[in-house]
Amino acid sequence: MGRPGVTFRRFGWNSGQDTFDVMTVDTSDIQITTVKDEPGAKNLKVEIPVDRVQAAERAAAAFYAKRARLPGFRKGKAPLGVIRKQYRGEIRERMLQNLIGDGWKLAVEQERLKPIADPAVRDLRFDDSGPLTFEFRVEVKPEITLQRVGGFTLKRTVVAVTDDSVSDQLEELRGQKATWIPVEGAKPVQGDLAAVSIATHEEGKAGEPRQYQVVLGEGQAIPDLEEQIARLLPDETTQATVRYPDDFGDQAKRGQSRTVTITLHGVKRRQFPDVDDAFAREAGDFESVAALRAAIREDLEAHAEREADADVRRQLMDELIGANGLEPPAALVQRVLSAYAQSYGVPDDQLERFTAEFRPLAERQVLRDLVIDAVAERETLQATEEDLDHRIEELARLRSTEPAKLYASLQKANQLREVERSITEEKVFAYLLGLSTVANA
């Protein structure tokens, strides 16, 4: 039921709607009852009395009366009856937006909702002589109960950094500093950059050629196509049938064959710099190759330590999920999958394959977030303003900037919540790991 004396300041209840005039909204006459609960969702019935509906209609009509420009009347001087007739649909829409927004704000407060999406409004009913009624169906963050959060034995394994791994990293750095040198009169080999044009044949006719830059051996083209390119000399053209691999990303093309016309326009080959003290100075202002190798080793060792810590956290989360028999809510998993697909720009015809491949990852992320939120709330481990200030100061020192400027930059980019979340996660894992045993392998 509605509670007396509850008020909210209204700014518009949903992004995408217009911003209403700031005003105090009394919601004591709005009645909210739970229709039914279901896993991950709540269904609430809202009843708004007729006098409030009529007042909202008058307010909406007045809003348009002040702004309307009608023939024969000065702005804001048209009779209210004319306004109601001319703007009937707009007045109704604004009235409903305001009333539904009032109901939603009260529902969030009264039911202490933790919505994960905007509510769905359904079964809306009202007439001129009765109350307005409708239902909210809202997806909410499910509450989980953790019976066991400690007593686990975890193994921490730090991968040793070898001379070979240092050399591999040095070779990768050398590749980044390489330059591309044109090669005359030679067929491209693995690692070469080939400039080609490719025309695909449809119904026996070659289509418009498209230009590509392909580094052979790096998986930038299907194997059959790379094989054909490697047979050509610069300025040579060939026509061939190529087959898409059975594991090709686009399901519709897997195992399919296409006739193509390929022209090789040019070949470039990497010229790698010598690994000497001059290279070391250019790579990072190191005095010698020995100093560069030492720095690479230090970075790799730090990375190995971080990976070992991350693996311990993964083990801990697996133990927690298994010990408490947690199952990921389907609605949350689907939201995460949709976010993944949008982030990666997955086309519609690949969504089914993408969803199947990434579902385990999405399920794990959902459970991980639910566990962290539950522990943070139970143990009061959420990031505080003081925590955030300290972290901003640390980041500012690393970036050689002022904390206030960094704070403003993160706030503008909507990244403050990410910083807060990372602090909360650190505090939660520190607490949980203190309840278990971590053995170094």
Image (cartoon, rainbow, N blue to C red):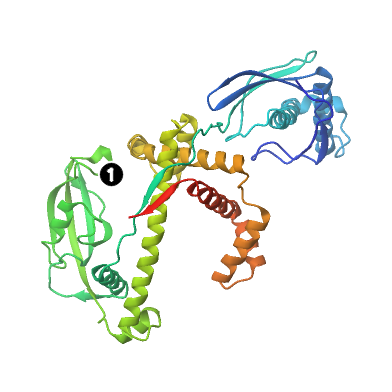
- Residue at x 54% of width, y 28% of height: 40
Image quadrant of residue 143?
A: top right
For residue 374, side relative to residue 67 (left or right):
left
Seen from the viewer's position, the closer of residues 12 and 185 is 12
Residue 362 in view in this figure: no
Q: Image height check: is 224 above or below 389? A: above
Q: Position of residue 147 (x, y in %)?
A: 51, 32
Which residue: 31% across, 82% down? 290
On the image, numbered disc 1 is attached to which residue?
A: 249
Q: Position of residue 167 (x, y in %)?
A: 25, 72
Q: Nearer the viewer, residue 79 or 32?
A: 32
- Marker count (numbered): 1
Q: Residue at x 24, y 49 (%)?
A: 207
- Horizontal and vertical percent for residue 402? 64, 70
**Quarter of the rendering occupied by the C terminus:** bottom left
In the rendered view, would you say 313 is above or below 45?
below
Q: Is residue 395 visible?
A: yes
Provide residue 116's location: percent of width, then percent of height. 57, 35
Which residue reaches farthest left? 231
Quadrant in the picture for the N terminus: top right
Name which residue type carries label 1.
Gly
Q: Residues within 10 Å of mark 1 (few under 14, many from 20)?
A: few
Seen from the viewer's position, the closer of residues 117 and 440 is 440
